[in-house]
Image: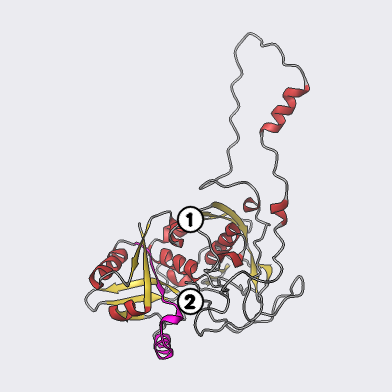
Amino acid sequence: ASLLKPPAAVPKAVPQAGPQAAPQAASQAGPQAARQAGPQAGPQAAPQAASQAAPQAGPQAASQAASQAAPQAAPKAGPKAAPQAAPKPRERVGAQPEGPLDDAKAQPDARTLHDTGDLNPAYGAVKGKPFVREEDDKGDIDMDDVSQGRLGDCYFVAALAAVAGRNPEAIRSMITDHGNGTYTVRFKEGGAVLVDNQLPLQGPDNPAYADLGDRDADGPELWVALVEKAWAKLKGGYEQIRGSKIRMSSTDAMEAVTGKRTTTYYTSSTPDDRLLKALDEACAKGMPATAGVHTKDRFDEATITTMKGKGVYCNHAYAVVSVDTGSKTIELYNPWGKETARPKLAIDEFRKFYSVVHVNAR
């Protein structure tokens, strides 16, 4: 699922480094305008300069040069010198080559392709901090911190919302603030990625993609935008994390974030009682869960209008908020943000509108 969030009013644009198409309003009718049916036309964005740099010489180079510069001295009698400690390797979660992922100034390609015109926002610094707690929040990491931007990556931001709501410490452990405007973001799939506070902007402090969260005297909350940027950097650019283009080895984006196994339930083959029980247990045990809506071609226009009236949009992903097994209802969070209506559906409606449920282990 990868529906694009409808754009809000766009402030005065940040000057661009070169000519580009103006951002266009995305349509809400049916599947997102940004999703492409086949190979994209047009020039590809230039690769990052950092990725073209030659690999750095390893720590063995100096010792090899020294050993070749003069004949080996005869061993001397006496006590041996204590061996020097090997240099500590760069922190990694999984197998990962050194290169642009370790360079905070190597920015992922910000250009994304849209039927109504490409979006190519310029990078600008946003000063804030990873986590902010507002008065009405349970903590400084909450589901409603998540607000999708003008990119069809609802599968990813819905996963972040679900994890934030059920297992906020998994989000906290992903991010290290180095205190200088740079951050290490750790994925269980792909490893550690170094990013800075430069974000693709469509106006001052107005990201084009994942929005900023809560605010306090120190500025806005950055964690969602930072994690999305690191995901884009890991996958080769913002266009490459679109739902129609992403390539993952995990079953679900929550696995890439938490490293825990995800169980998938298809509504067409899972009985009501089993589905409700699975979601009720997930909520009770702090297990993140998401749900994906069927594509538009499954419904007639009257049904699509009814769905929108309930806050349900085709080809879109949601985080599960709560389940009432007594009334057999399911409440969901739309990653378009906390101002967006939260669908609360009876199980028969849920099964009709939604195709799949993912439950991540704890």
Q: Which residue carries the number 2 mark?
A: 337
Q: Which of disc 2 and disc 1 is earlier in sequence? A: 1
* Residue that protrudes farthest toward the top in the picture: 77
Say which of marks 1 and 2 sits in front: 1
* Residue that protrudes farthest toward the left in the picture: 326
Q: In the structure shown, which secondary structural element does the residue marked by tag 1 occupy?
A: loop
Residue drawn 58% across and 30% down?
A: 85
In the displayed structure, 64 sits above or below 208; it is above
- Percent position of residue 32, x then y: 53, 78
In the image, which disc is placed on residue 334? none
Which residue type carries mark 1? Ser
Q: CA distance from mark 1 to mark 2?
A: 28 Å
Q: Quadrant of the C terminus?
A: bottom left
- Percent position of residue 342, x then y: 40, 80
| Front one among 209 and 275 | 275
In the displayed structure, 109 sits above or below 58; it is below
Residue drawn 31% across and 64% down?
A: 282
| Front one among 118 and 132 | 118
Mark 1 neighbour density, 10 Å: few (under 14) some (14–19) many (20 or more): few
Colour treatment of the image: secondary structure
In the image, which disc is placed on residue 249? 1
* Residue that protrudes farthest toward the front in the picture: 38
**Region in magenta:** 287-309
77 is within the stretch colored magenta: no
Res 141 seen here: no
Which residue type carries mark 2? Gly
Residue drawn 34% across and 62% down?
A: 286
Q: In the structure shown, which secondary structural element does the residue marked by tag 2 occupy?
A: loop
292 is within the stretch colored magenta: yes
